[in-house]
Amino acid sequence: MIASPAAKRYAKALFRLAQDEGALDAVYADILDVQRLLRESPDFAALMGNPVILPEQRDQVLRELFEGKVHALTLRFLSFLDHHRRRAAEIAGVCQVFDLLTCQAQGIQPVDVHAAHPLSEEQIGKLTTRLEKRLGGKIRLTVHDDPALLGGFRIRVHDTILDLSIASALQRVRNGILQGAAS
């Protein structure tokens, strides 16, 4: 997903506010929770992206979901984004950019791993250690299950993808056979 210019502006503003209030860690944890909720709850994602729902209704739902569970700045920001600016649909992009800004500030590289099968805590630990050594710094590993890979995994660091999946290997073999048959 590519964040809109508006999402980038709002994320930067929230980042600066969180830094100024000394609440960066708390707001960052909240933003990660909102990102997870957007991924795991199609209903929540639909609520945030639906322009037909009145801001007052969405604000009520946001308060029921988050009040007392997130930092006050996070809740104020979510309410502001929706109620005052009518930008609730931008929340996914704002979260994405805020995540990147925070990782950059903390010297952490976000790494996404798509695995064919769920990875154990031990496997995640070993993979994290190897990737930190290879990338030369701290990482934040996010693991996604993707049975379509058949086996192995796909690693994404920024714009670089390392595809070590069986599905990809089979596709390369297939392409090689087709190239040979065409010659």
Image (cartoon, rainbow, N blue to C red):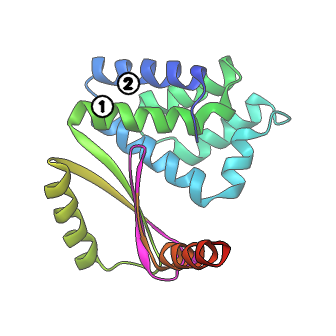
Q: CA distance from mark 1 to mark 2?
A: 7 Å
- Please identify the residue farthest to the right as the structure is shown: 52
Q: Which residues are magenta?
A: 144-161
Between disc 1 and disc 2, whose residue precedes? 2
Residue corresponding to mark 1: 24
Q: What amino acid does circle 2 point to?
A: Phe
Residue corresponding to mark 2: 15
Q: Are marks 1 and 2 in contact (CB under 8 Å)?
A: yes
Q: Quadrant of the C terminus?
A: bottom right
Q: What amino acid does circle 1 point to?
A: Leu
Residue at 57%, 36% in the rendered image: 2
Q: Secondary structure at mark 1?
A: helix
Taking 129 as reference, is 155 left or right? Answer: right
Q: Does the rendering let one see residue 111?
A: yes
Let me know if residue 129 is in the magenta part.
no
Rendering quarter of residue 122: bottom left
Q: Residues within 10 Å of mark 1 (few under 14, many from 20)?
A: some
Q: Does the rendering let one see residue 71?
A: no
Residue at 51%, 46% in the rendered image: 34
Q: Of residues 100 and 156, which is closer to you in this image?
A: 156
Residue at 51%, 26% in the rendered image: 76
Q: Secondary structure at mark 2?
A: helix
Let me know if residue 157 is in the magenta part.
yes
Taking 53 as reference, is 118 left or right? Answer: left
Taking 3 as reference, is 88 left or right? Answer: right
